[in-house]
Image: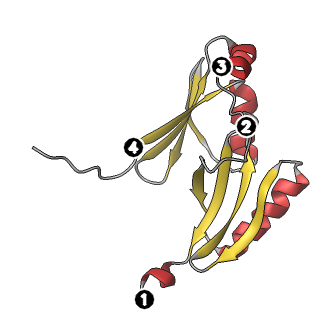
Amino acid sequence: MSFQVSGINHFGLSVANLDESITFYTEVLGLKVSEKREHDCFFALGDSSVFALLQYPGGKEAFDKEMRPSKKGKAFTHFGFAAPSMKDVFTFEKLLEDKGIEITKKAYERWDGGSVYFTDPNGYTLEFIYFDPTTHEK
């Protein structure tokens, strides 16, 4: 018997400080909290996906010692949030700069769209990316 994955249902990140991370993801990325509990928080993305923040057991000290990414934006391991347009990628870069958020790769255009890379308060690398749908029609 074989199975086929039909999409991503949810993605969860362990975080050093839940409240600080919620502030980052709501104020910087404009995500809306769909549910918050004592040790976790959920954001609905699109029609069927969920992004979760999970308070790391032991708090910031334990997270820093056991989980914090050591490369801090320098490795290719990351995940990307969809941008509605190429213009939005560059506008978002300005918002990151205005908020003093570390940009690890400035906004740029490429053959199929463009993106900007940055880090969240936990040291995770994030990408705001636009894929031009016309490049996939060729």
Q: Amino acid at mark 3?
A: Glu
Please tell me which of labels 2 and 1 falls first in the chain.
2
Which residue is tagged 4?
9
Circle 1 SS class: loop
Tag 3 or tag 4, which sits nearer the N-term? 4
The number of numbered discs placed on residues in the rendered structure image is 4
Cα–Cα gap, marks 1 and 4: 30 Å
Compared to residue 83, the image places residue 65 above or below, namely above
User: Which residue sits at x=76%, y=30%?
Assistant: 20
Which amino acid type is marked by label 4? Asn
Relative to the observer, which residue lies in front, 108 or 41? 108
- Is residue 95 found left or right of 30 in the rendered image? right
Mark 2 vs mark 4, foreground winner is 2
Q: Which residue is mark 3?
A: 66
The tag on residue 79 is: none
Image point (49%, 78%), residue name: 133
Distance from disc 2 to disc 4, alpha carbons, whole Å, reads: 24 Å
Circle 2: element type: loop
Q: Which residue is mark 1?
A: 138
For residue 53, what is the image quadrant? top right
User: Which quadrant of the structure image shows residue 119?
Assistant: top right
Picture residue at 19% right of the left edge, 47% below the top: 3
Q: Which mark is residue 123?
A: 2
- Rate crowding at label 3 as few (under 14), some (14 to 19) or many (20 or more) other CA atoms within 10 Å: few
**Disc 1 residue type?**
Lys
Colour style of the rendered protein structure:
secondary structure
